[in-house]
Image (tube, rainbow, N blue to C red):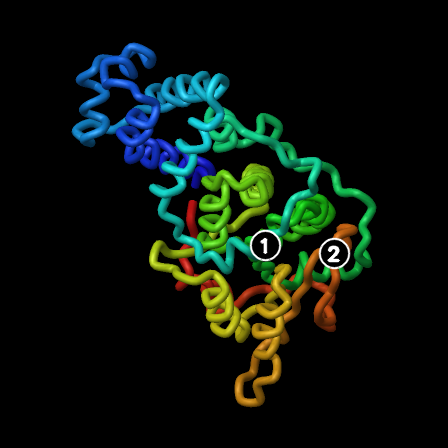
Amino acid sequence: MDIFLLNRERMIAIMQSSLRQIRQLCGWSAKDLGEYMGVTRQTINNIETKKTMMSTTQYVALCAVLDKRAEREPHIMRAAIAILEGNTTMHTSPEILAGIPKPPADTIQELTLLDKWFMAFPDSNLRMPAGKPAEMDADSINAIAKYYKIIAHADFLLHHQAEDFFAKIARSLKEVGNKVIIPLRAIEVMQDAILSFDPNLYVPAKKGLNLLAKMQKNHLLDIRGEETDQDLNGLLQAIFAQHRTHHRLFLLTQNQDLASDILQLNESKTIQAYPISAGRLKEDGHLEELTAITIPEVQETPEKSDTEANAFEGWATID
């Protein structure tokens, strides 16, 4: 799965749907805009009527033309952005987007349309950084990596300290061949956020998607989900309820209410299951354990039964 590709495809589709409005806003005829972009008037008409799909080259050319116009008339860009936002369909609820951790103030920057385009590519250096000295107890890190299926919410991945955390735990994960499970729906939350022109959304979203690309390259990522998956919080509650009978599950989330709801499953008296554990990142980068880590008495990686090995089959792997 190319984590960034869908964003680029959606950006082009949104721009194509907005082209006529933006062209008219700028006071250009189809012939004028075609000359600026190096295409014919008919090409502009075909794009606007969706007889042909806008190409990547045409998108980049249009962004360059609009950015140049905005240098002289910044209000034009503000109006164009309003048009683009009005034609953007978000698959993520406002409540989920509101829960995205705000980035540090010194990371906020104004972006041109071309800047936004290049945000939809991974950074050139995708090497996972070496882990810093562990702030968590080393035994806890090893226990999480060795004995738990780790499932991460989007809000955890978007935390500005998330990359440092995964760098700390990466070696332990690789030693036992474990991976961090990311719901496809969590990735879609970040993909929605990066389409926004609000820096409080797109700055952490870019960092979060880039982190996932690094983890994917280092074979630390297991993307699971279905296109029909809906609300992320409800999905996670269902997944933990379904799979806790076969696996020790560890939830990484910044949402205390969600963690509390999922940890309530531990109170069940009628279902034999492993206890669920959870943690969240503090501002200083420490992992705050919301429940105690349980370590099996047998200090070896247990062999999985057929039932246990197939326990996640109902939640599809995304390549």
Q: Quadrant of the N terminus?
A: top left
The quadrant where residue 226 appears: bottom left
Looking at this view, is 42 or 319 the one in front? 42
* Secondary structure at numbered mark 2: loop
Cα–Cα span, label 2 and label 1? 12 Å
Q: What percent of the width, then of the height, locates residue 81?
A: 43, 34
Q: Note whether residue 32 is visible.
A: yes
Looking at this view, is 49 or 311 the one in front? 49
Q: Around disc 2, counting alpha carbons within 10 Å, would you say few (fewer than 14), some (14 to 19), or many (20 or more)?
A: few
Residue at image position (47%, 72%) is 242
Vertical placement of residue 71 versus 171, above or below: above
Q: What percent of the width, then of the height, locates residue 248?
A: 61, 68
**Residue ID for mark 2:** 282
The furthest residue to the bottom: 269
Q: Quadrant of the C terminus?
A: top left
Residue at image position (59%, 64%) is 303
Q: What percent of the width, then of the height, locates residue 174?
A: 65, 47
Residue 303 as seen in the image, left or right of residue 226: right
**Residue ID for mark 1:** 155
Residue at image position (42%, 27%) is 76
Residue 67 as seen in the image, left or right of residue 42: right
Residue at image position (60%, 59%) is 150
The quadrant where residue 277 appears: bottom right
The kind of residue on which mark 2 rests is Lys
Q: What percent of the width, then of the height, locates residue 305?
A: 52, 68
